[in-house]
Image (cartoon, rainbow, N blue to C red):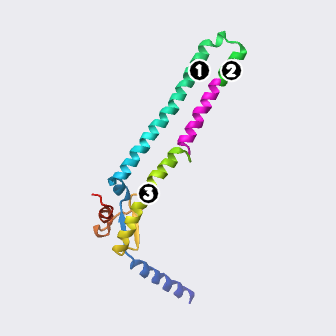
Amino acid sequence: MKISHIIGLIAFWVGYLSAQKVGFVDSQSLLERMPEYKAAEQEIERLTQQWQKEIDDIYARVERLFQQYREQEPMMSPEMKRRKQEEIETEERKARELQRKRFGPNGDLFKQREEKMKPILDKLQQAIQAVAQEKKFAIVIDRSAGGVVLYGESAYDLTEAVAAKLGIR
């Protein structure tokens, strides 16, 4: 008796799910066509290069200090050696801290990317949702974000409809 109920329930859910329209989009393709996305990417790249130069400059200073130390070490008193070593260590620490601040897991780059991309991603999400609702799709899969679509009828590809909704070619 229980097995027949389970089989009946499974059959009901399979029937229900097969009645749902499933579409797909290529969000990466859409993002790359959005001018605001390109501008945000360029700004992030500019910041990344600027911050990396700051860090590289500090490391270059560390290298110069270390070279000076090696050249002058034979003539230094123990106290002078200690001070020079501390100076080198301080500069190295400063470079590592700046690198962590700029590029660490919750660093400036992460925050800038989130700040600049969130409005763009929200706009894309709203367009996808609007198109899905207009065309009566229950589920929309993103083929570029790990939503593997091995085959999809072009009638279920909503990418160009979303592009039109966003006003992009």
Instruction: Work out whether mark 3 precedes mark 2 in sequence or the reverse, and give the earlier one.
Output: 2
Q: CA distance from mark 3 to mark 1?
A: 46 Å
Instruction: Name the quadrant of the C terminus.
Output: bottom left
Q: What amino acid type is highlighted by mark number 2?
A: Arg
Give above or below for 19 relative to 147: below
Q: Which residues are magenta?
A: 87-104
How many numbered marks are there?
Answer: 3
The answer to whether residue 96 is magenta is: yes
Q: Which residue is mark 3?
A: 119
Give the percent coordinates (x, y) of residue 148.
40, 61
Give above or below for 97 relative to 86: below
User: Which secondary structure is most common in the magenta stretch?
Assistant: helix
Give above or below for 144 relative to 140: above
Q: Which residue is mark 1?
A: 66
Instruction: Name the quadrant of the N terminus.
Output: bottom right
Q: CA distance from mark 1 to mark 2?
A: 12 Å
Instruction: Work out whether mark 3 precedes mark 1 in sequence or the reverse, and give the earlier one.
Output: 1
